[in-house]
């Protein structure tokens, strides 16, 4: 009974938090209902929820960032990333120097539109599915993977606030003028919605809490983490799949005009830095012993 009251109390506290601070949405209720269902259904589902604790914490932090957007914390960089991208990766097209994003804006392909949308949808589901697989195969590695995932996001979020940056589609639609009242935009992914007759990406980006969070691209970071732990687990066939997904997501980020190439490279650097810090620093602290004990709890 005491444990049940604690769980229900935390759920109520979270709902009060989003209702009075973050801003309540229907998906908050779905999130709480899913967590409570997993916790109370049976012992296995409860352990799954506990094992995915770092993913749950990631979502709460990410969603709560809308309370104080990064453009209110530091000046938004609109032209600087664009100029750097053009200087590093620009090329001649129709008599002018263009960025890869500007080239893809004028040169789309229905096959690439669909493939880029499918790859872009893999950014969280693939790591999450890998985490669920690890739950049944290697619970300690699951904790290492999920904690590294959380740390990557924390590093990325810190950079979001240190250097707010507009995505390529913002320059495409608004130029270099500042306009902080706009919602997120699906940009090139609108072609995916149009071809399939859905509003999947439109609905997703309309709720985006981080319009000016192009640097670093966490879409580029997650596949590196998944690939690293797949190789560490010696899942060679799966690692090849993860590598293909990595390439697909990276291409899609630029093709869809959501990120510059520099955003993708900085996202990759964020993931690599996290892996190095985690392996060389975090695991040499008391956290390692805590994770061992936590792994016993979810076994």
Image (spheres, rainbow, N blue to C red):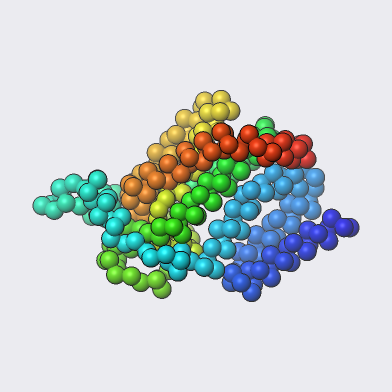
Give the camera-side residue of 246 and 215: 215
Give the percent coordinates (x, y) of residue 290: 72, 40
Indicate the quadrant where residue 247 lies: top left
Give the percent coordinates (x, y) of residue 81: 31, 55
Q: Residue furthest left?
A: 95
Give the percent coordinates (x, y) of residue 106: 23, 55
- Tell me the quadrant of the picture where the C terminus can be found: top right
- Up-down: is 41 above or below 268? below
- Up-down: is 113 above or below 232? below
Q: Is residue 80 visible?
A: yes
Give the camera-side residue of 140 and 117: 140
Q: Is residue 252 visible?
A: no
Indicate the quadrant where residue 233 lies: top right
Query: Measuring 78% from the left and 40% from the top, which residue is drawn there?
Result: 297
Give the percent coordinates (x, y) of residue 273: 48, 40
- Up-down: is 103 above or below 276? below
Q: Is residue 286 left or right of residue 64?
A: right
Query: Measuring 60% from the left and 64% from the top, which residue is drawn there?
Result: 27
Give the camera-side residue of 43 and 291: 291
Q: Is residue 56 left or right of residue 265?
A: right
């Amino acid at each position: 009974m005491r444990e049940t009251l604690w769980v229900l109390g935390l759920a109520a506290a979270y709902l009060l938090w989003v209702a009075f601070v973050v801003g309540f949405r229907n998906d908050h209720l779905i999130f709480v209902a899913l967590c409570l269902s997993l916790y109370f259904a049976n012992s296995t589902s409860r352990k799954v929820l506990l094992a995915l604790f770092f993913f749950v914490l990631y979502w709460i932090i990410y969603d709560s960032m809308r309370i104080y957007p990064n453009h209110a914390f530091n000046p938004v960089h609109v032209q600087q990333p664009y100029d750097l991208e053009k200087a590093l990766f620009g090329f001649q097209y129709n008599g002018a120097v263009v960025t890869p994003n500007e080239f893809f804006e004028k040169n789309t392909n229905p096959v690439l539109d669909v493939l880029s949308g499918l790859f872009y949808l893999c950014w969280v589901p693939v790591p999450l599915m890998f985490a669920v697989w690890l739950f049944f195969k290697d619970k300690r590695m699951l904790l290492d993977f999920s904690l590294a995932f959380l740390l990557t996001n924390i590093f990325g979020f810190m950079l979001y606030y240190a250097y707010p940056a507009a995505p390529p589609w913002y320059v495409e639609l608004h130029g270099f003028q500042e306009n902080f009242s706009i919602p997120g935009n699906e940009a090139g992914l609108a072609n995916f919605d149009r071809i399939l007759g859905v509003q999947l990406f439109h609905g997703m980006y309309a709720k985006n809490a981080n319009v000016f969070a192009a640097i670093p691209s966490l879409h580029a970071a997650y596949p590196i983490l998944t690939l690293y732990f797949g190789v560490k687990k010696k899942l060679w066939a799966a690692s090849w799949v993860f590598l293909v997904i990595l390439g697909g997501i990276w291409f899609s980020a630029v093709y869809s005009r959501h990120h510059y190439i520099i955003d993708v490279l900085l996202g990759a650097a964020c993931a690599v830095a996290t892996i190095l810090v985690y392996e060389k620093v975090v695991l040499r602290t008391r956290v390692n012993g805590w994770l061992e004990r936590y792994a016993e709890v979810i076994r």
